[in-house]
Image (tube, rainbow, N blue to C red):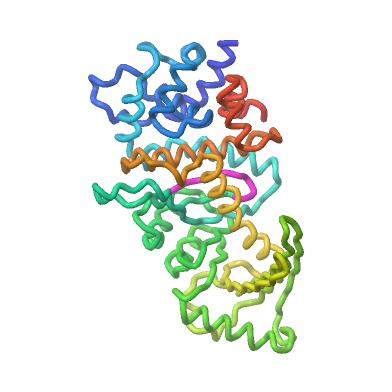
Amino acid sequence: MADVRRISLDKVVAHFEELEDPRSTVNRQHPLVSVLVIALMAVLAGACGPTGIAKWAIMKAEFLVTVLSLPNGIPRKDVFRRVLMTLKPGAFQACFANWLQSLRMKAAAATGVEQPVLPVDGKTARRSHDRSDGLGALHSVSVWASEFGLSLGQVACDEKSNEITAIPELLRLVDIKGAIITIDAMGTQKAIAAQIIESKADYVLALKGNQETMHQGVIDYLVEQGKNGFADVDAHAHHTEEKGHGREERRTYIQMPVLRSLPGVKLWKGLKSIGMVMSECVRDGKETVDIRYYISSLAVSVKRFAHAVRGHWGIENSCHWSLDFTYREDESRIRDKHLRENFAWFNRFTLSLLKQHPGRDSLVMKRRSCGWNDGFLLQVLTGAHI
């Protein structure tokens, strides 16, 4: 059994072998790759900081020495803390590129999805601030593959307003070719749209007041055409109804070719269509109506447009919600800048691994099972079940 475990874990270790060790030579009693793989396994098993990683490792010492190189025994808490504080987040995250590509290819083959929806959105770890040192809460922007359940990359920024500069950097880190990129209104920028098209991807971008001229132009045009049921334009509609959790929701998606006379339309590279989503929700006898507007590089195909819009909500429902309620990320008090960013990436990557496991248990139960059963932990870590 030990040989089988060692072979399977060697594939995991290989992803970290090219990472430069940030420690001085006198502080290298424990191999860097072993420190990182232990940390990764501990986070899968429920650890939420260096102390938790070290305690889990001590309890699993008999198992760990059979699968990793640990010539000086189990590392202490200070080792995990020092390594994760000194590793540059960009270089650390780059180690996962090949691993993520492999997971993405397997997920694409399993789902048959050829043009995945990749939502881009930001999230704040609200308690990670340190006012005494002038350190604001960690805000990071990430890419989530909705159909695959994979977090493909993240970039940290100081505040939500800085997403505009973080998104282009993030899109350079991730292979987006052939995908549909969806972004909330904050990221609806001409330069970002151009970058997506130049990367051979498509976009569906939400419109709000930050693009006031285009936003108002789209609203005015859709309202005018809607007066006669869009009879004068090549508009396509799609309707959905959902019931559950004490509410009923009806959504109407409308998409049509972009009007070339719209103000500023030529400044948006690849722009082909505009869209509207009207959501009517009834809960406890009260009805609310919400209307949202979009611009897109997609040709008119209203079901594909609707799928992209719904797919964007996946980053909130499947990723951010899980990080807060399964990982308790919003309660994290990790305050070192690099440590908290590296840990945020551990959370996102291990969430992706848990979602790839085909078992029907909840994420909470899968994570507990990783802590209880070494074989199950290795299954999740290596994908041996696939």
Q: Is residue 319 above or below residue 121?
A: above
Please say whether residue 303 is one of the residues in the magenta stretch.
Answer: no
On the image, the x and y values in percent for residue 148 come to 62, 45
Would residue 224 be seen by someone viewing this image from the given angle?
yes
Residue located at (30% from left, 29% from top): 82
Q: Is residue 303 left or right of residue 15?
A: right
Give the magenta-colored segment's residue range: 146-154
Residue located at (33% from left, 24% from top): 79
Q: Quadrant of residue 192?
A: bottom left
Q: Is residue 299 above or below residue 69?
A: below
**Depth order, front residue of 241/289:** 289
**Count of marks, rendered view:** 0
**Depth order, front residue of 236/219:** 219
**Depth order, front residue of 156/271:** 156
Q: Quadrant of residue 190?
A: bottom left
Residue located at (31% from left, 40% from top): 336
Q: Is residue 238 left or right of residue 49?
A: right
On the image, the x and y values in percent for residue 295 come to 56, 72
Quadrant where the C terminus is found in the figure = top right
On the image, the x and y values in percent for residue 353 come to 57, 35
Q: Quadrant of residue 90?
A: top left
Q: Is residue 98 left or right of residue 275?
A: left
Please say whether residue 151 is one of the residues in the magenta stretch.
Answer: yes
Quadrant where the N terminus is found in the figure = top right
Would residue 253 be seen by someone viewing this image from the given angle?
no
Residue located at (49% from left, 73% from top): 268
Q: Is residue 302 above or below residue 343?
A: below
Q: Is residue 249 left or right of residue 173?
A: right
**Depth order, front residue of 9/376:** 376
